Image (cartoon, grey):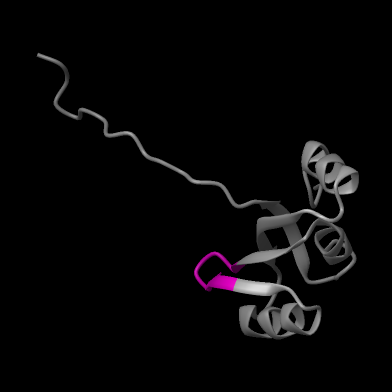
Amino acid sequence: MDRIEPALQAKLQQRPQDTVRLIVRVAGDVTQAVARLKELEVEVLRSFTLIQAVAVLCSAATALTLLQEPWVQTVEEDQQVSAQARDTQGSR
């Protein structure tokens, strides 16, 4: 399983000075991951213990270094998500 989508990795490599918002999925304790992220000077925006993930803000270069951490499972862009209502009664 890839830790990062190739398109996102290329984007980070092309613009290492850019600031990016990411979701980092972690293996193990989220609290320990948050502590390590802070050591790496990554701004932690929010942690999600249910899905073992952390929303972060950091430079693209720092994001690429996160891929070397053994507890990082995946790194993806933090994007707005929306849900569509579904008619469960059928259309009439």
| 17 relative to 30 in the view: left or right | right
> What residue lies at 17% left-to-right and 20% top-to-bottom?
90
Q: Residue 26 appears in which quarter of the rendering?
A: bottom right
How many discs appear? 0
Where residue 40 appears, as percent x and y from the top left, is: 81, 78
The stretch drawn in magenta includes residue 40: no
Most extreme residue toward the top is 92
Q: Where does residue 75 sit, x and y in percent of width and height?
A: 73, 55
Residue with the most extreme left position: 92
Residue at the (33%, 34%) spot, across then down: 84
Q: Which residues are magenta?
A: 45-54
Image height of 83 relative to 23, above or below:
above
Would you place residue 90 above or below residue 56 in this image? above
Q: Is residue 52 above or below residue 10?
A: below
Which quarter shows the C terminus? top left
Is 52 left or right of 40, judged from the image as shown? left
Q: For the point 87% across and 53% down, which residue is it? A: 16
Look at the magenta stretch and give its main secondary structure.
strand
Where residue 19 sits, quadrant-wise, is bottom right
Outermost residue on the front side: it is 17
Residue in the image at 63% along x and 78% along y: 30
Residue 34, position in %: x, y? 67, 80
